[in-house]
Amino acid sequence: MMESVLNEAERKITLLEEKIDYRFEDRQLAFDAITHSSYQNEHKGIVVSNERLEFLGDSVLSLITGELLYKTVSEDEGSLTKIRAALVCEESLHEFAKQLDLGDFLLFGKGEAQEGRHRASTLADAVEAVLGAIYLDGGLTKAKKFIQPYIKEKLNSMRTSAAVFRDYKTLLQEIVQKNRGDKLSYEIISEDGPAHDKVFVCCVKINSNAMATADGRSKKAAEQAAAKEALRIMGVEV
């Protein structure tokens, strides 16, 4: 069994290296980075999942993104925090994973393979695991080379749309709070599509009265879109 596991892993690692243009010196780090917990569960004592690398990669990603924003964005600390959160959120990392076809290179258990390759949270976690592995294997410079081009691309896209600089939920909350006793709430009223490509519809309410509905590719995106629509209905320029 061990030989077949290693052969499968080596094949996946080689394909991944070609895709990301990086050659691992420590093959074990690469092996761990592509190993989902479901695969570990089917090969107990033989392989290690990517969860620890994901933990490390999350910190590395935050550092790289924070440094980039500090050097390129002239905003206050609160705004920088919001922008960084948008850049490193699950939805953003899922987009990057799809660009890399990362799901094709991961090792899954038999019961998880079909859905796991497309699940947003799994793919976002895998981006962080690969980043963590590159950081340990090649240092911060190599880690930046892997992730920074996408972060810059995403930041430029956000600047163009200005979406990241407008937190519609916070703006709506500030307006509603001026009327004491009014309560703002959000409800996901429907979701449609396959697990890896869902569309969520959100309704924003004041005191249980529906104000506006809108959709998005994630629950958070749908809530922001609903808040924006509510602001538009209220006559607020957004």
Image (tube, rainbow, N blue to C red):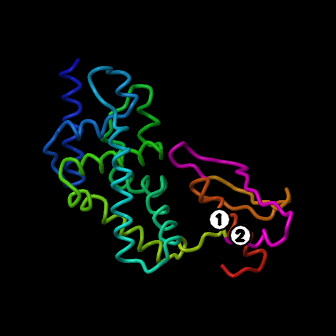
| 8 over 193 or under it: above or below | above
Badge 2 vs badge 1, beta-carbon distance below 8 Å: yes
Q: Position of residue 235 (x, y in %)?
A: 77, 80
Mark 1, residue position: 225
Name the side, left or right, on which 30 lies relative to 169. left
Alpha carbon separation for disc pair 2 and 1: 6 Å
Residue 189: within the magenta?
A: yes
Q: Helix or strand or loop: what does disc 2 sit on? A: helix
Residue located beneath label 2 in the image: 229
Which amino acid type is shown beneath numbered disc 2?
Glu
Residue at 73 percent of width and 75 percent of height: 232
From the viewer's perspective, is residue 57 above or below residue 7?
Answer: below
Q: Position of residue 199 (x, y in %)?
A: 60, 52
Q: Which element carries disc 1, helix, strand or loop?
A: helix
Label 1 CA crowd tier, 10 Å (few <14, some 14–19, many 20+) = many
**First to last magenta residue range:** 171-199
